[in-house]
Amino acid sequence: MSIKEILKSGAPELGVPLGDIEKFCVYYELLERRNKDFNLTAITDETDAAQKHFLDSLGVLKSADFAGKSVIDVGCGAGFPGFPLKIAEPSISLTSVDSTEKKVSFLMEVNAALSLDVKCLHARAEELGQDPEYREKYDIAVSRAVARLNVLAELCLPLVRHGGKFLAMKALDSDEEIEEARAGIEKLGGIISRVDEYDIPGTDLRRRVVVIEKSCKTPEKFPRRFGTIKKQPL
Ligand code: SAH
């Protein structure tokens, strides 16, 4: 099936908006064309990209009201989940961050080709978390496939404003990872409020979104340096 067919039937099945479907097609063409030069993703087949990148990314829309929100995607790689979210819900103000320069070059190319108006940043999340321009500035942080939740929470929660949310996209077998992160999330000013699940249409894959509310400000000492975050996770 083509990207268009998969998305047209998949988005309503998932219960999410889709936005301009042509933008997903151009995004895929660029992803396919640039994958070799930039080593962007293991997924290159059209069906896999539509299901495991585009529809999976859109699944997070079910876990919060994104309209008009400021959103930061931490460790976005080739743009997931943030770029599909911005196509489907253009009213969000999106910042996509990655620490690998060549991935950010690709993002800038997609951003220009699709006129998305995304702020693409080559940066480390833990450094942004200590920068007053970015610290506690976002309504929503999202992240997929970047680190275990106890590490990821320290990268993402400092960027979320008091009253905002961090939505961590995880696999179904994440019970242990979630329990292991619970106490650290509280130290960072967060609280796990729910774990949502959805099926990726057309596949037998089921995914999770760990919904974390920012209930207090993050203490100034967090985020720590990356070496410390990894060696001594909260
Ligand atoms: N979210 C994308 C990419 C996952 S791969 C997807 O789901 O397809 C993980 C990405 O996180 C890599 O591109 C890596 O460069 C980036 N990353 C890892 N640690 C980071 C950090 N501390 N700050 C910013 N980006 C980071």
Image: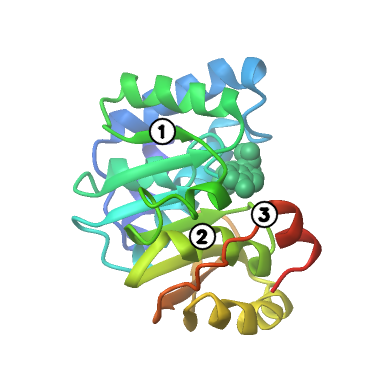
The answer to whether 82 appears left or right of 203 in the picture is: left
Q: Quadrant of ligand 1?
A: top right
Task: State the image quarter where residue 16 is shown.
Answer: bottom left
Q: 118 left or right of 158?
A: left
Q: Quadrant of residue 66?
A: bottom left
Q: Nearer the viewer, mark 1 or mark 3?
A: 3
Q: Disc number at residue 225?
A: 3
Which numbered marker is on residue 120?
A: 1
Q: Earlier in the sequence, mark 1 or mark 2?
A: 1
* Residue found 74% across the figure and 59% down from its top: 228
Instruction: Please give the residue where the numbered disc 2 appears in the rendered image.
Output: 156
Amino acid on which the number 3 mark rests in the picture: Arg
- Quarter of the image for residue 67 reads bottom left
Q: How does the figure colour the protein chain or chains?
A: rainbow
Place of residue 35 in the rendered image (x, y in percent of width and height, measured from the top left): 61, 22
Give the Cα distance between marks 3 and 2: 13 Å
Q: Looking at the rendered structure, which numbered label has been put on residue 210?
A: none
